[in-house]
Amino acid sequence: MEISSCIAQTLDEYVDIAVAIGTDALYRSGIEAEIRAASDVIFEDSAVIEEHQRVFEWLIEKSRAGSS
């Protein structure tokens, strides 16, 4: 996808990015545009889709196990 503007190298960078996304509408709009422009890459790669499916199934299973 080649979108690296949201990848943090440190905890402080992670916080800075999260705050910027949450509070700076212009920054957030730029990130959204980058993701939209590259979204075809995500959905054309079946490995990505399968990994998302695996994660969601695991989360559902974990949630149900905790509810028992």
Image: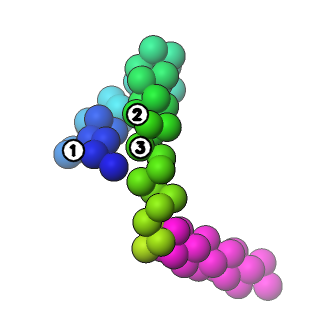
Element marked by disc 3? helix
**Distance in Å between CA atoms under marks 3 and 1:** 25 Å
Element marked by disc 1? loop
| Left or right of residue 67, residue 5 in this image | left
**Three-letter code for the amino acid on which mark 3 is drawn:** Ala
The residue identified by callout 3 is 38
Residue 54, image quadrant: bottom right
**Three-letter code for the amino acid on which mark 1 is drawn:** Thr
| Left or right of residue 9, residue 57 in this image | right
Give the mark nearest the N terminus, 3 or 1: 1
Residue 51 within the magenta-colored segment of the rendering: yes
Residue 41, image quadrant: bottom left
Residue at 51% x, 75% y: name it: 50
**Distance in Å between CA atoms under marks 2 and 3:** 6 Å
The residue identified by callout 1 is 10
Which image quarter holds the C terminus? bottom right
- Residue stretch in magenta: 49-68
The residue identified by callout 2 is 34
Residue at 58% x, 73% y: name it: 53
Give the mark nearest the N terminus, 2 or 1: 1
